[in-house]
Amino acid sequence: MNLDRSINKLSERLNNLYPDVNNNGPGYWKGRKIIPTSQWLKITNTISKTTGKGEVLQYFPDSYIPYVFPFEIPENLQEEANKWYSDYLELMEHRRDPEYGSTKCYECLLCPHRDESALLIGIHKVIARGLEQEKGEDATPIYPCPVINRFECPYEKEKELNVNNLFALGIIAHVTDRAFLKAFSMTKSNETVYETDFVTGQVKEINTLYDGRPHSWSLEYPVEEKLPQVEKLPIVPIRNVNDVYTALKDSETLAKVLEQGLEEYLSEKEFIIKLFMNIKDNVRKDDLTVYEPIFASHVQKSKCTICEDYANIHCTNCSGNVWLCIDHWRIHKKDHELPA
């Protein structure tokens, strides 16, 4: 019994002295030697494009490198390289590497990397501000998190605002963003007029400038490439920050946006609505960003010649004012096809 305790204590001491001992002695991990990252980079930079790639799989760099292989792995080394990479990430986890730890924060609600994306509206900041207010008016701001390192997370042991909840809310913020962006994309498509020459098979887009004036781009697209991308009318038009702000504060409007854009997360709709209704008094416009807002078009659109639904595809081949919806432009296209 005393011997067991002594062995355990010795093992603990060795682990403290040599944290990378893995049945191979200090300085090794999973049978491969750990070398300084600078040495690893030197090896990869000097390796031939066609030979010697297997050499790097004999070592592990001692810190995290986002793009660890600056070359294509040959097919005969793919399986070994995949195993190597899995072991490498385990090593970084074991060492609690701060750079690797920062990558594990990306899906957290409080990680500021979301601010760098032009494809996000800012829903993460809205939720974070709501969480702050729940702690009281004098609460310390929680966004952005000052510790972008999962291994040093300040919320690891908190009961109310624990790290698991922050990651779950990060997902909620992301899917809500996507729902609004879906509505934005549909609105933008419907504010565009598609001048279509079915004889030549070319489409030209007419967009709207900030003052409402139409602007026709010189670039033309193939009919079968562009028209299938034209989207149907959105349930709720989203053109700018004001539209997002209004939807986040009204449960019925928000429900319509979510029903249209949540896709696989539709089961979370009621939770998301409840979340935003609880924090709606703390929603601020300056937390939201809509890049390139949509301006209402002064270009006259019409109804589909075939079904009388909304239409923004205009046929330039017909002498009459022929407009088509997304469901019927192919039928009209046949009228302009040359007989075989």
Image (cartoon, rainbow, N blue to C red):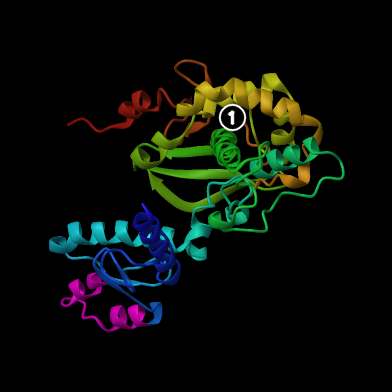
Q: Position of residue 81 (x, y in %)?
A: 23, 62
Q: Is residue 56 magenta?
A: yes
Residue found at x 50% / y 58%:
101
Q: Position of residue 266 (x, y in %)?
A: 51, 23
Residue that badge 1 annotates:
301
* Magenta: main secondary structure: helix
Front position in the image: 312 or 188: 188
Residue found at x 87% / y 41%:
137
Amino acid, disc 1: Lys
Q: Would residue 66 be visible to someone looking at this image?
A: no
Q: Would residue 69 be visible to someone looking at this image?
A: yes
Q: Is residue 259 magenta?
A: no
Q: Residue furthest right?
A: 138
Front position in the image: 214 or 260: 260
- What stretch of residues is rendered in magenta? 39-59
Above or below residue 274? Residue 145 is below
Residue found at x 31% / y 68%:
69
Above or below residue 70? Residue 155 is above
Which quarter of the figure has residue 252? top right
Horizontally, is 236 left or right of 278 in the view? left
Above or below residue 236? Residue 12 is below
Above or below residue 304? Residue 294 is below
Front position in the image: 186 or 167: 167
Q: Position of residue 47 (x, y in %)?
A: 24, 81
Marks counted in the figure total: 1
Front position in the image: 288 or 148: 148
